[in-house]
Image: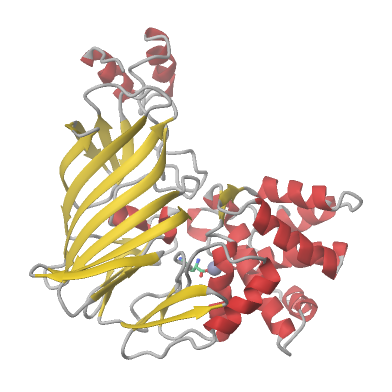
Amino acid sequence: MVSWPRRIAIVSRSVRLAPALVVLALTACGGGPGTSGAPGVGDPYFPKAGNGGYDVGHYALDLAYDPAAHRLTGTATITARATQDLSAFDLDLLGLTVDAVTVQGETTRWSRGGQELTVRPPRALDGGDTFEVRVRYSGTPRTITDPDGSQEGWLRTDDGALALGEPTGSMAWFPGNHHPSDKATYTIEVTVPRGLRAVSNGELTGERTSRSGTTFSWRVTEPMAGYVATVAIGGYEIRRSTAGGVPVYTAVHPREENADELPEVMAWARDTFGPYPFSSTGVIIARAGDSEYALETQNRPVFPGTPDTGLLVHEIAHQWFGNSVTPESWKDMWLNEGFATYAEWLWQEDHGGDSAQRTFEALYASDDTDLWAFPPAEPAGAGHISDRPVYDRGAMVLHKIRQRVGDDAFHGLVRGWAAARRHGNASTGDFTRYVERRAPDEDFSGIWTDWLYGEGKPDRP
Ligand code: TRP
Ligand code: ZN
């Protein structure tokens, strides 16, 4: 590792404002030290989401929340690998107060601007280095209003809180590389006042009570995107069981009912999509009104009140499509929502309801302008990634593929996709290439141009 003159660090800082200076800065120091990691990964819809220059391997979050004071205290220890020489790098964190930052145990300089926490390690990191950055922080975490008007981040509830992260809410409660393309393992420890529980992703590895409260320790061993990380704090009732050999940990708000169909939905989903990608399952049933929507938080989705079967199927299907196979960017959201919606159609078809063909035809007959507003693979903007074309037209794309290849090949294709990209990321292009490779004798080009990328309602169903 090399240290470098402060002057260069200042030059590289202005890089953010003037891309032309990147070239200058790199030339001036031969592409070596004095290079800042980019403040975003280049997501077309959320340009500041995530950061360049490193890859996170593991987050160790140590949190304490006092619901009466609405105060969160946290230490985030992040283990990452530099993918380039780094004189500085960013983490995403919105709101809260940063109390201290260390890199490799050494106190380091940092600054903040918007959602970017810029860390300047005392010694430059070399590309390929593994490093540990630790951030101590505290304060009242924010609720964020999405570009589409929905609420995420840290939501207060009657007796606790609920953390939801899609698409950008996770930066409201821990610093990180908050973009779906950088998945990592986690340990999440949460201390809450005695009598309350803290439920999170993965498996509960410990629970201990001391004078300061009860600490719940969670461990996530499969890669997880930050937007499906969660913490639910409240007077939850816990139910433990197993479903097809997978441990179930379910938390139900005392005023709500459990989702009793979980074992049946899990069994059906495994038959339909292949092996379950995670080492535990369950649901978090918050109180109706605690959030405006359900979210497929990893291992155990969150529901505002007891879900109906369709919604349960949707969020469980996301464990395969979204959480295990994760979009490369927010543009690829239809790979999540099209599949989760199509899962609802398939469940209906398999349980005496409408066939997927019928559901498709009914949708095609609709002239609802919302449904045809934009192509599923090209949402009309950051405020539209959860709109109907992403869900319903996304599912229609999958049905078109099924019509083309036939039922058996389609089921093989869906299971194959989940297996091929298990615990990874994928873009729309990855998906279309996969389909074409699996069925080389078919021509999908019309489906892609009309259904996936085409504006407006396709001329023929
Ligand atoms: N992605 C969630 C699901 O399909 C729903 C969701 C999350 C949502 N954030 C949203 C819907 C914002 C509308 C607006 O289960
Ligand atoms: Zn969904």
- Quadrant location of the N terminus in the rendered image: top left
Residue shown at 29%/15% (left/top)? Answer: 2
Q: Nearer the viewer, residue 107 or 145?
A: 107
Q: Nearer the viewer, residue 3 or 444?
A: 3
The percent coordinates of residue 133 (x first, y second) are 27, 38
In this rendering, is residue 94 above or below 399? above
The percent coordinates of residue 73 (x first, y second) are 17, 57
Which residue is at the far left?
211
Horizontally, residue 210 falls left or right of residue 82, namely left
Horizontally, residue 150 falls left or right of residue 243, namely left
Q: Nearer the viewer, residue 87 or 445?
A: 87
Residue shown at 32%/60% (left/top)? Answer: 144
Scheme by which the image is coloured:
secondary structure
Image-quadrant location for residue 114:
top left
Residue shown at 57%/57% (left/top)? Answer: 333
Image-quadrant location for residue 261:
bottom right
Which residue is at the far front?
245
**Residue 460, can we see it?**
no
Q: Nearer the viewer, residue 440 or 220?
A: 220
- Quadrant location of the C terminus in the rendered image: bottom right
The percent coordinates of residue 320 (x first, y second) are 59, 63
Horizontally, residue 404 falls left or right of residue 373, namely right
**Residue 34, can we see it?**
yes
Residue shown at 29%/56% (left/top)? Answer: 172
In this rendering, is residue 444 above or below 164? above
Count the numbered circles shown: 0
Horizontally, residue 133 falls left or right of residue 450, namely left
The percent coordinates of residue 438 (x first, y second) are 81, 52
